[in-house]
Amino acid sequence: MKFSFIRPAKYFLMLSAALVGVSIVLLIYPGPDLSIDFTGGTMMEIRIPSSATKDDLANTLSSIVFTQEEEEAKTSIGNFSISATKGSTMLIRMRDLSNPEHLQLQAHMNETLGETEELQFTTIGPTVGASLKKRSLWALTIASIAIVLYIAFAFRKVPRKLSPWRFGLIAVITLLHDVLITVGIFIILSQFTSFEFDTLFVTALLTILGYSVNDTIVIFDRIRDNLLTQNRGEEFYIVADRSLKQSVTRSINTSVSTLIMLSALFILGSESIKWFVLTLMVGAIIGTYSSLFLATPLLVYWKKKT
């Protein structure tokens, strides 16, 4: 019996539904660990003397008391987190600091720990963080709507028994599938690593949308061409299955070549883009899976229902 992509599709659909369900639960609890890009605050990367430890740094941060000369008020640093990087530096996340507080913190660390080197200092106000969060959600929403409209227009000449809107809506369903599962995976990673959801991660998600929809459109385009040249009386699922078989080699080759390039970038690239590259790698794998085992079977099942 010849291999068919459509026959085992129900198992892949069940797997995808389960993964999406788990990802939605993870979004609710424990939820994404948002960076200061979205929450507002200060991120500081420093290199402390070799004689000092992470605990020493934590005690230093806990003990500092900021003094405001004009207001004669004393404040503490509040809640903070410290994580060690691969470059033997310390990454500190805390509430947003004013410039005088920043200078006082530097002086206090130098006095308590010894000479420290500040490599990075970034502060974002809570209003800016909320604005970035809203804009990121709008970017994902607008991109999805634009994809539906574009695909519906591009496939407007499909046979009348198939609505072009189906192609667009199913493409977006697979995109949401890819994004949700990718987000779920990184929520899990954030519980065991220093990863945080930032604007670079949103950029990676938008890149995944473009990559995944490109792969899906290639397969849908092959289905459209085969529909226009099919033998009369040939069932739609046979045409769809044949189209998948004709496209699978191209899809896998594209994905493998992309993963080779991203793997090289992940290994040889700078530390600042490692999470971005890893997100693209995960998205490329999930996007290829959804294009081959999710998009076309959904189109076939929807056709059967009408």
Image (cartoon, grey):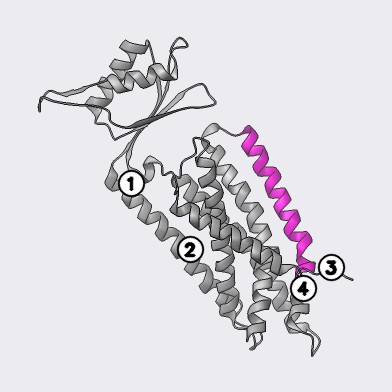
Q: Estimate the spatial distance between the alpha carbons at disc 1 and disc 3, rounded to whole Å.
A: 51 Å
**Magenta segment: does it hold 252?**
yes
What number is the disc on residue 241?
A: 4
Looking at the picture, how far across and down is residue 196, in whole percent? 46, 41
Amino acid bearing label 1: Gly
Q: Residue at x 55, y 56 (%)?
A: 22
Which quadrant of the rendered structure holds the C terminus? bottom right
Q: SS class of the residue under badge 1?
A: helix
| 99 versus 236 height, above or below | above
Amino acid bearing label 2: Ala
Range shown magenta: 242-269
Image quarter of residue 142? bottom left
Q: Mark 1 sits on what residue?
A: 129
Amino acid bearing label 4: Asp
Q: Residue at x 59, y 57 (%)?
A: 19
CA neighbours of label 4 inside 10 A, class few (<14), some (14 to 19), many (20+):
some
